[in-house]
Amino acid sequence: MKKETYILKTLVYCSLFLLITRVIYTGQFYLIFLFWNIFLAWVPYRISQKINALPENQYIRLTALAMFGLWWLFLPNAPYMLTDLVHLRFSSYYMVWLDILIIYSFSISGLLLGFFSVLHMHEFVKERYGKWPAEIVTHLSVFSCGFGIYLGRVERLNSWDVIIHPIHNVKHILMSFFHPDYFFHSWGFSLVLSVFLFALFRVFRLIASKD
């Protein structure tokens, strides 16, 4: 855990340093939204830590289930930062090199926050329900992030939109996924990202493994 904390703090602090340096140097607040994005990536990580701290008690199973649902809802916010590269088209010629470093730094930080949180959740499910349920939850959660990123980047939906306006947004999500006019784009976008994230997670898990 100390190693994990050290890795994440180093990356996040480096990301913040680069962004603050840009703001001071240029006097512009371009890319400042990355502060908010890294906070959203931090949310599922903190939830996964909290849920692992819950005692094994049948009376708190509903609490654990609610936390798990909230974690899954916010998880795509972590790898979502990979798509912030689209903002490079607004960078000036002389600052694009720094903007690339900033976005890459935040993207890697967000990705690792998400992957570590998945490992936390894997341990939680494994301890209480066994190895195979943990493996199923782990792989489904990573794979489902592709569609979550599609909803955020293309449909411009936020995680809390599902909570605030559930019926409207569930209809919107279903239409995006199954309507003939959106079917190939939504599935194609989601599938490509899901496979990419799944491959990255497999590599990350192998490196992070203690075996």
Image (cartoon, rainbow, N blue to C red):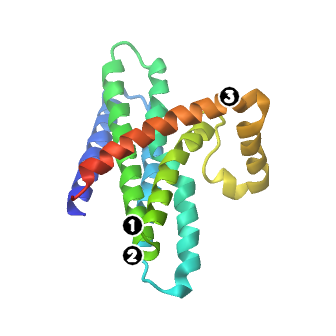
Q: Is residue 125 above or below residue 86?
A: below
Q: Tell me if residue 34 can be seen.
A: no
**Other residues around mark 1 within 10 Å, as few (<14) / some (14–19) / many (≥20):** some
Q: Tell me if residue 138 can be seen.
A: yes
Q: CA distance from mark 2 to mark 1?
A: 7 Å
Q: Which mark is drawn over residue 53?
A: 2
Q: Residue furthest top?
A: 93
Placement of the C terminus among the 4 image quadrants: bottom left
**Residue placed at 53% from the left, 54% from the top?**
74
Placement of the N terminus among the 4 image quadrants: bottom left
Report whether 183 appears left or right of 3. Answer: right
Mark 3–mark 2 CB contact (< 8 Å): no
Query: What is the x, y in percent for residue 129?
Result: 47, 73
Query: What is the x, y in percent for residue 94?
Result: 33, 14
Report whether 108 appears left or right of 133. Answer: left
Residue ID for mark 3? 184
**Residue placed at 77% from the left, 40% from the top?**
175
Residue ID for mark 1? 49
User: Residue 50 sits in which quadrant?
Assistant: bottom left
**Other residues around mark 2 within 10 Å, as few (<14) / some (14–19) / many (≥20):** few
Q: Earlier in the sequence, mark 3 or mark 2?
A: 2
Q: CA distance from mark 1 to mark 3?
A: 37 Å
**Residue placed at 65% from the left, 28% from the top?**
185
- Between residue 110 and residue 37, name the one nearer to us: 110
Q: Amino acid at mark 2?
A: Ala
**Residue placed at 77% from the left, 27% from the top?**
181
Q: Amino acid at mark 3?
A: Phe
Q: Is residue 120 above or below residue 58?
A: above
- Between residue 119 and residue 82, name the one nearer to us: 119
Mark 2–mark 1 CB contact (< 8 Å): yes
Say which of marks 3 and 2 sits in front: 3
Q: Amino acid at mark 1?
A: Gln
